[in-house]
Image (spheres, grey):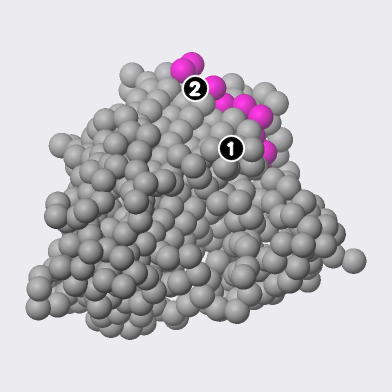
């Protein structure tokens, strides 16, 4: 019999309200790859995409712009200006695949730049079909790599349930734009190989005003980091809500073969950071998976309810709340550093669970350096030295069970992400979908690493648990190839996307 160990995390009840908040509700305009600037936006006379997104666009607050199926090639700039409570919605026409190919052409650059305000982009695919993935020029701006991506500088811009892959950087979210959200997106194979290292992240973000939300995204196989909240001494890293993301195997296509799944920190202080209920994984279960803190002394961080596979590094925070997390690693579990003037008395650190796997010495699982002094510790010494984890738990070896989680989509009923840590290497797991599907509804379950491939399961929901096979799945190869070939994902770790089917 397959295992049935599933936990769901997330607000099902708010889905309809959130969807209504993101939707337009006003006039409808249509865009087509062969649309024209002099079109009127009807199905019969659609606009071209550049005009529909420009200041000449007929769309006003509360309106919807539908992109009809097909490929839109080149760089585009959105200047749309919705309003609070009445955003402009830009989305693919239901049931059709609308792809923006950020490939440089005779008209200019390859970036999909978003300015303006209060605009929601929903369900679009953004990619780059250019095959060059390696350069002899070091650094972040080689002249022979032009892969584009989403460059967001507008205020309160949302990106919902999009697929962004094979760009230079998936999403660039900058401090010139207040707030905003990247939600429910599938982000993979972004970046390129340089002579110095792999470059290009899934999400590269900075913020100064309000809070940027990075929630419920699936982020894997970038040439560099998954989530990269980073900046120089002149940048700003204030206010990030990072929740429910599944980040795994980032750096895999690069020559190095690995990069952190999540980085928060840089040359400027990070503050107002919430890292909640995220999931990480990397082959081999070792290396640093999450890096919180870089050069500067940071403000406050809350890290609660996360499931971390790989070492988690925390450096120079004035205030920490680290509780209710699961740490699993074949090497060090935690690396904690606090420089002179920082007191662990300002750290709330308790009720975490640690699983030390592999041959790494149990007495060296916690790397601690406080005010320039410290060393490698076992769990008992960690508690005695720091005063942390009075109610924490530690054990050797992998968990003897399946840990599986369902994250319902806030904006789309019947859609969810399913994350499975198959520590027993079972052949399948049964999931209860009664809270997400109605009896009689058609559905399909897709492997996230092969999102445009065939469903692993599809059918009509009859109210009974759905059996998901836990087998290796080959990830989609980067356009043009990577410096390394990607290895199959599974059966120890699997990520699925549940959605309604026609």
Residue span colored magenta: 345-354
Residue closer to the observer: 324 or 456: 456
State which quarter of the image contains the C terminus. bottom right
Side of 28 relative to 323 (left or right):
left
Residue 457, above or below 338: below
Mark 1, secondary structure of its residue: loop
Crowd around label 1: few <14 · some 14–19 · many ≥20 (10 Å): few
Residue closer to the observer: 295 or 332: 295
Side of 99 relative to 313 (left or right):
left
The residue at the far right in this view is: 1
Q: Which residue is drawn at 20% across and 68% down?
A: 39
Q: Which residue is drawn at 71% across and 55% down?
A: 437
Q: Residue at x 70, y 26 (%)?
A: 391
Residue closer to the observer: 214 or 224: 214
Numbered mark located on residue 203 in the image: none
Mark 2, secondary structure of its residue: strand
**Magenta stretch contains residue 183:** no
The span from disc 2 to disc 1 (Cα, nearest Å) is: 33 Å
Residue 459, above or below 374: below
Judge whether residue 45 can be spotted in this image: yes
> Where is residue 207 drawn, in percent x and y?
27, 37
Side of 71 relative to 364 (left or right):
left
Q: Name the residue under label 2.
A: 347
Main secondary structure found in the magenta portion: strand
Image depth: mark 2 or mark 1 in front: 1
Residue 266, above or below 344: below
Q: Which residue is drawn at 77% across and 51% down?
A: 434
State which quarter of the image contains the N terminus. bottom right
Q: Mark 1 points at which residue?
A: 14
Residue 495, above or below 345: below
2 and 1 marks in contact (CB < 8 Å) = no
């Amino acid at each position: 019999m397959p295992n049935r160990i599933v936990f769901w995390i997330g607000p099902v009840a708010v889905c309809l309200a959130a969807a209504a908040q993101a939707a337009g509700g006003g006039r409808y305009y249509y865009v087509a790859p062969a649309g024209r600037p002099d079109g009127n936006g009807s199905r019969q006379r659609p606009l071209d995409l550049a005009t529909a997104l420009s200041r000449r666009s007929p769309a006003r607050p509360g309106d919807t712009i539908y992109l009809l199926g097909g490929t839109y090639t080149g760089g585009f700039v959105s200047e749309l200006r919705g309003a609070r409570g009445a955003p402009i919605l830009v989305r693919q026409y239901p049931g059709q695949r609308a792809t923006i190919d950020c490939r440089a052409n005779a008209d200019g650059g390859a970036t999909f730049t978003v300015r303006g305000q209060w605009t929601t982009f929903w369900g679009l695919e953004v990619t780059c079909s250019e095959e060059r993935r390696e350069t002899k020029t070091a650094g972040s701006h080689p002249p022979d790599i032009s892969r584009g991506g989403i460059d967001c500088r507008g205020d309160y811009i949302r990106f919902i349930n999009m697929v962004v892959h094979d760009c230079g950087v998936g999403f660039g979210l900058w401090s010139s734009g207040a707030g905003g959200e990247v939600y429910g997106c599938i982000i993979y194979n972004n970046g390129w190989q340089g002579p110095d290292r792999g470059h290009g992240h899934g999400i590269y973000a900075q913020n100064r005003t309000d809070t940027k939300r990075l929630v419920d995204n699936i982020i894997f196989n970038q040439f560099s980091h998954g989530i990269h909240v980073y900046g120089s001494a002149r940048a700003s890293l204030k206010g990030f809500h990072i929740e429910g993301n599944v980040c795994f195997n980032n750096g895999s296509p690069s020559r190095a073969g690995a990069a952190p799944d999540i980085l928060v920190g840089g040359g400027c202080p990070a503050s107002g950071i919430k890292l909640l209920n995220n999931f990480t994984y990397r082959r081999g279960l070792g290396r640093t998976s999450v890096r919180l803190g870089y050069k500067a002394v940071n403000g406050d961080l809350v890290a609660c309810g996360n499931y971390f596979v790989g070492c988690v590094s925390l450096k120079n925070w004035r205030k920490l709340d680290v509780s209710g997390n699961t740490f699993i690693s074949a090497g060090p579990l935690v690396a904690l550093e606090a420089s002179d003037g920082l007191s662990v008395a300002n750290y709330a650190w308790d009720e975490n669970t640690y699983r030390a796997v592999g041959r790494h010495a149990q007495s060296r699982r916690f790397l601690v350096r406080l005010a320039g002094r410290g060393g490698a510790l076992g769990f008992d010494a960690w508690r005695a030295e720091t005063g942390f984890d009075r109610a924490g738990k530690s054990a050797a070896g992998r968990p003897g069970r399946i840990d599986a989680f369902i994250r319902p989509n806030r904006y789309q009923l019947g859609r969810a992400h399913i994350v499975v840590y198959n520590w027993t290497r079972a052949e399948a797991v049964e999931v209860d979908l009664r809270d997400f599907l109605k009896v009689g509804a058609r559905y399909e379950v897709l492997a996230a690493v092969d999102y445009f491939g065939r469903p692993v399961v599809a059918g009509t929901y009859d109210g009974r648990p759905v059996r998901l096979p836990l087998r290796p799945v080959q990830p989609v190869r980067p356009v043009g190839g990577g410096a390394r070939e990607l290895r199959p994902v599974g059966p120890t770790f699997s990520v699925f996307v549940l959605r309604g089917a026609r």
